[in-house]
Image (cartoon, rainbow, N blue to C red):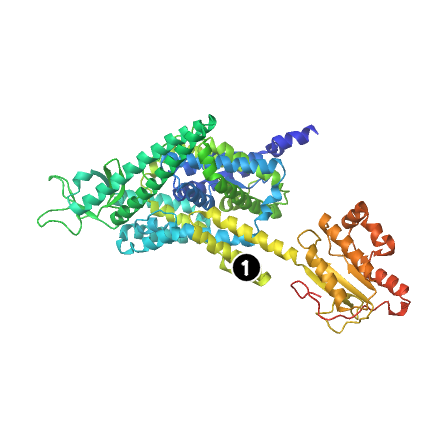
Amino acid sequence: MTRHLILRLFPFVAWLPLSPLLLRADLVAGITGALVLVPKAMAYAQLAGLPLQFGLYTALVPAIIGAMWGSSRQLATGPVAILSLMTAAAVTPLAAPGSADYIGLALLLALMAGCIQLVLGLVKLGNAVNFVSHPVILGFMNAAALIIGLSQLDMLLGIPKGRSDFFLMDVWEMLGYLPLTHLPTLAMSVGTALLLLGVKQIRFLAKSGVLLVVLLTTLISFCIGFEHKTTARIDDVATPVAREIIEKHDASLRHMAAIANSITSLNAELRQAEKNRDSRAAAELRFRLNLLEIESEAAQKDSRASMRTLRKTYFVRTLSGEPVRFHQWNAVPQGVKTDGRLWHIQKISQGQLYLNGGGEVVGAVPAGLPSLKMPAISLNGIAQLMSAALVVALVAFMESISMAKAMAASTRQRIDPNQELIGQGLANIGGSFFQAYPASGSFTGSAINLQAGAKTGLAMVFNGFFIAITLLFLTPYIYHLPKAVLAVIITFAVASLITPRAFLQVWRASRADACVAVATFVLTLLAAPHLDKGIIIGALLAIGHSLYRTMAPRVAILGRHEDGSFRDVTVIPHLVISTRVVALRFDGALYFANVAYFQDAVLAAVADHRDIKYLLVVGDAISFIDSSGEGMLHSVVAQLHRSGVEVVFSGLKKQVLDVLRATGLFGFIGGEQNIFATETQALTAIYSRLGEGENACAIPPVQRPSRGRGDRP
């Protein structure tokens, strides 16, 4: 009992004792996994809209906690592409990517998702994830992978991209910037892709190939001077039209910041008024907040319009030695010498222009381990992120448990879904206190762990130590790493998630499920960047379809086949039949949603044959009955008895018989005289009562009955 409690609280105790051979295997697996994880973690942070070090933070603490408190010994917990995209999708509408507010909301999202996972695990609801069916996940994963790929186009081509509440519109707008493609960035992207494909063909480089490509491209970037950045003041822009647009955009940003401060202040006053139960003041504050929100939307619209124009505007800089000015590239006065480089505005802040005239690199990455810090918790933030946190928690767990079960099949390890939920929940909660955004089990990292021979979760502890070393000592060396390289890594990572053949396989199995998968795919694309809406609607469609099927299950009128079995007379019309008994099989649970359907089917079968004396209900497929079903059966039996038709049952399961006995319906039906174990026993008794023992092999003909979908005999 004591050992069981210890293992429940500290699952990692099961790793003991640790032999030197086991330690060596886990050390090799941990280092091998970290070599791949370091560049991918930074790439996923870029996808999430966070500074790159946050990807390394997410690969550190959550990895160690997830391994120590999870049930899988090879599962690698850390940043993944899908959750990175979902984090960006959830937080981007609420704050500017990379800002302090954005980071705070991302950490809060990790905390909320972790709490949801932990609670589900503690109350043993690990199977609750099954409410999100395979077709829904299939549609969502394919749409998310496509969105991830499209979201990297600006980094791959070096063109600007806007952010709005309609991702596909942003992509369409971005395609209009294709003529502005930055050729050195495109060359870097193509070169990186070719290098990655090349190292995969070299066996001994396959695992560490990503890291080698990162090192090589970083060196090339440094040698060729890939990055070119500068700053300027608005007054340094010499072209009047361009300067006017910049001033307008800067004014919109300042106005939006002022409105945001006013909204924050009024929200605080509103909470105080509600606390004091001052309804008059609260109503006035809500009115003022509504006006500010309308004003903020108008300012955002103006800001997006001006920035859309600026993205298409390129500048040239006058040579040093003269007063430095920036002219629009197609409006340079004659005789003015320029540096020959095209510059575009990346950001405008507080009257300062941040311009880029080359390829983008990751820049300075702060060194040092993440500090212990409480996530910024606010009621407003929790309310805005709740739906996203629920979806993130479920998607993260599904990705983790599916990989854990796949590995368990080869390692013959028992996986406990509830313990895995607890482990993933603690990983996200603990990670949020060390500046980690939502994490989950990684397909790539877990596969490397398995292939490298990891025996326990200690491999991920070693993995975490390597990440810590990187944060402490190696970050200065990645300053010149091109962002295009990270974009290529992300694109390669999600390419395997696009599986059109899986849709075809689902179509062959069930056209209804295929429709749900396609609907989820389309809705997720249309709802982007709000990915939670796509998967929630898809899950509701799947649940609705499942309920629809149970509301109208298959009802079959049976006849005796020549091999002695009972089959559906609508499928095999030449079955042996009689005219005094109807045998009806109901293929589904009998509960409130389908009791009316069952009653209609029974009455229709009886109405088709007015001379029958017995109705045999074959209940082998009735696995459950609720109070509505019991009440309906009582009514049908009484109604048919008054019509001179005796109702007989066969094959009822124990749980159904228990309900009938508890409610007294068992005796009302006739007890053991009218309830039999098999159809043959029931028919033998029926024909014995009719004085037609020689016809016990036959059951009566009817016209084609109303029934549910399907044509299984």
**Residue 517's x, y, as percent?**
52, 56
Element type at mark 1: helix
Q: Quadrant of the C terminus?
A: bottom right
**Residue 583's x, y, as percent?**
78, 64
Determine whether, in the image, residue 250 is placed left or right of residue 362: left
Q: Nearer the viewer, residue 237 or 45?
A: 237
Residue at the image point whose x is 41% and y is 36% from the top: 54
Q: Which residue reaches farthest left?
A: 335
Residue at the image point whose x is 38% and y is 46% from the top: 486
Residue at the image point whose x is 47% and y is 35% from the top: 382
Q: Nearer the viewer, residue 587 or 713?
A: 587
**Residue 271's x, y, as percent?**
44, 29
Considering only vertical position in the picture, is 282 above or below 551? above
- Specify whether residue 474 is in view: no
Q: In which quarter of the image is residue 608?
A: bottom right
Residue for badge 1: 514
**Residue 7's x, y, as percent?**
64, 32
Q: Quadrant of residue 21?
A: top right
Determine whether, in the image, residue 44 is placed left or right of residue 556: left
What amino acid type is highlighted by mark number 1?
A: Ala
Q: In which quarter of the image is the N terminus?
A: top right
- Specify whether residue 530 is in view: yes
Q: Which of 288 and 648 is in front in this view?
A: 288
Q: Which residue reaches farthest top?
A: 276
